Image: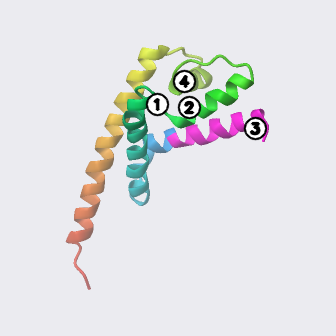
Amino acid sequence: MTDDVLNVVFFVFHTSWIAFTCLGWIWRRTRRWHLLAVSLTALSWFGLGLRYGWGYCPFTDWHWEVRARLGHHDPPSYIQLLIHELTGIDLGPIGADALAVITLAAVAVLSVVLYVLDRRALCARPRS
């Protein structure tokens, strides 16, 4: 694949991952997958982050490599780039990091609580 195609693929995949991480808790059928996505994201940020730096995301790392070959000079945060591309607003690195952490924390709590409630409801259901 050419770098132009890879750039689009990364934008679509990474943005879809973020959208699912933000919204996947809404639908009962996707809650298990959402919990997995949130867990993998947190594992990357905080687990891989121990080695590569807080908030490390391999998707961002790989995407930045492609974009560097295309001549782009990107901010440190994919969220910062995404917000700028979608709205024209320059959130800045601190604002982007705060938005990302607050959002991940909120959806993680939602995901765990809803998953537990769903499991309890399933277990409480009378069997025929």
Colouring scheme, one of rainbow, by chain, secondary structure, one colour: rainbow
Mark 3 Cα-neighbour bin, 10 Å: few <14, some 14–19, many ≥20: few
Give left or right: position of 60 versus 5.
left
Q: Residues within 10 Å of mark 2 (few under 14, many from 20)?
A: some
Sequence-first disc among 1 and 3:
3
**Residue at image coords 61%, 34%:** 62
**Quick one: 24 or 92, which is closer to the camera?**
92
Give, as a single range, the part of the protein colored magenta: 1-17
Q: What residue type is labelled 2?
A: Thr
Residue 95 in which image quadrant: top left
The residue wearing badge 2 is 60
Q: Distance between the residues labelled 4 and 1?
A: 18 Å
Q: Which mark is residue 83?
A: 4
Q: Nearer the viewer, mark 1 or mark 3?
A: 1
Q: How many labels does the image show?
A: 4
Q: How far apart are marks 1 and 2 (CA)?
A: 8 Å
Mark 4 touches mark 1? (CB < 8 Å): no
Viewer-proximal residue among 128 and 111: 111
Horizontally, residue 89 falls left or right of residue 54, namely right
Residue drawn at 26 percent across, 86 percent down: 128
Question: Residue 120 placed where, x, y %?
Answer: 22, 63
Q: Which of marks 4 and 2 is in front?
A: 2
Which kind of residue does numbered mark 1 sit on? Tyr
The residue beneath circle 1 is: 56
Disc on the earlier residue, 4 or 1: 1
The amino acid on which the numbered mark 3 sits, given as a three-letter code, is: Val
How packed mark 4 is, by other alpha carbons closer than 10 Å (few <14, some 14-19, many 20 or more), is some
Is disc 1 placed on a helix, strand or loop? loop
Q: How far apart are marks 4 and 2 (CA)?
A: 14 Å
Q: Does residue 39 sit above or below 29 in this rendering?
A: above
- Residue 85 is situated, as x and y percent measured from the top left of the image, at 62, 23
Per the image, the residue denoted by label 3 is 5
